[in-house]
Image: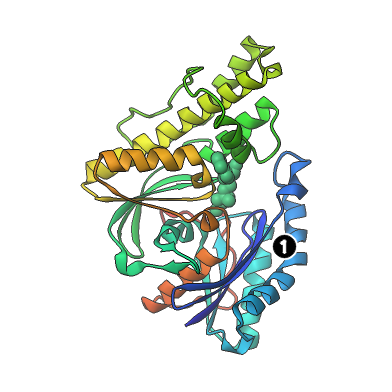
Amino acid sequence: MTVLALETSCDETSAAIVRDGRVLANVVSSQIRLHADYGGVVPELATREHLRNLPVLTRAALRDAGVESRAVDAVAATRGPGLPNALMIGLKSAQAIAFALDRPFVGVHHHEAHLYSPWASGTPLRAEFEAFQPNVSLIASGGHTLLVRVRAELDHIVLGSTLDDAAGECFDKTAKLIGLPYPGGPEMDRLAEGGNARAFDFPRPLLHDAGDDFSFSGLKTSVRYFLQKHPGLLDDPQRVRDLCASVQAAIVEVLVGKTVRAAERLGVRCVTASGGVTCNRALRRQLEAACAASGLTLRLADARLCTDNAAMIGLLAERELLHGTAPDSLDAEIAPGWSLAG
Ligand code: KG4
Ligand code: ZN
């Protein structure tokens, strides 16, 4: 089966071609530089960029894959959650293409696509669902932090989510306090590599709480107070690196600790992780170490699939169709607030 997939839920425009679990093409246009001047995503600008880029990227994906439009068997797009107008560009474009080609249309849940993305690896990327194991999965992105129990393919329940800021949001907001450019996560990661993670002690919110929820806004506030108490610190590049490493250590310890603990509590032998924050090198290293220490199999999303992309949308859409999920109607609407919890 050949699927053409589109993703426009936030600030990445992407088109992909997936055939029989293989990613034949995955083109992504990031708008990071466009939004950086504003310190965050400006929805109206994102929408205009999606509108401008999507036809070009769709053609590029077909060309890269060497696939003619008439060879496409199904068309998929992210239906939610995300920015309403941004979602509408991808969803309505996909429905129009499906109508023109007389093919089924699949509206995909963005987090569900992240959730199954760790099962794809290699070059070219290929989904290895034959290796699937029940797992506990961490989804850490800019807008969401979720801990999910995946009992079988397409059968999952949300164990916990963030009560306030997401992990990515915490990276971005604390980075802003430190004066780093948007988005702060990658910049914090880079500076933290040269810093001492034990230089400053920040809270590990809800790390020892019995539940599976997260909360990161208190950590951000404690960084703000810390900077008020140490006004000259940002003038010293080594202290800035130490600060980044210390903040990152707090976020990573909470994510790793709660994920591994949930797997052990539920007697699940496999852990997976996905979403933009999973690009973070300390998080990847510490998840590897903690899972190895607990005898857990770990599947981390490939770097090409961590941040937003249409390949993960196409991989999930194809899987849903193969499992017999009914296609969506050509006038299905966007679902900006769609929760993975159902
Ligand atoms: O999944 P994603 O691309 O978009 C959403 O669906 O939100 O995640 C973007 C988030 C941003 O908050 C960004 O700062 C964070 O992922 N991020 C990182 C790193 N790379 C991206 N955070 C920490 N370390 C990184 N290397
Ligand atoms: Zn995402």
Near-viewer residue (260 or 300): 300
In this image, 151 relative to 147: left or right? left
What residue do we see at 44% from left, 69% from top?
126
Q: Position of residue 338 (x, y in %)?
A: 51, 56
Q: How many numbered callouts?
A: 1
The extreme left residue here reads 267
Vertical arrangement, residue 124 with respect to residue 288, above or below: below
Specify few, some or many for label 1: CA neighbours under 10 Å numbering under 14, 14-19, or 20 or more. Answer: many
Q: Is mark 1 within 8 Å of ligand 1?
A: no
Q: Amino acid at mark 1?
A: His
What residue do we see at 45% from left, 34% from top?
252
Near-viewer residue (241 or 75): 241
What residue do we see at 69% from left, 70% from top?
57
The quarter of the image that holds ligand 1 is top right
Q: Is residue 213 visible?
A: no
Near-viewer residue (78 or 186): 186
Secondary structure found at label 1 = helix
Q: Position of residue 267 (x, y in %)?
A: 20, 47
Q: Position of residue 64 (x, y in %)?
A: 64, 75
Specify the quadrant of the image occupied by residue 50. bottom right
Near-viewer residue (151 or 247): 247
Colour setup of the view? rainbow
In this image, 82 relative to 121: left or right? right
Q: Position of residue 254 (x, y in %)?
A: 41, 32
Vertical arrangement, residue 36 with respect to residue 321, above or below: above
What residue do we see at 40% from left, 37% from top?
286
Tag 1 residue: 50
Quadrant of the rendering where the C terminus is positioned: bottom left
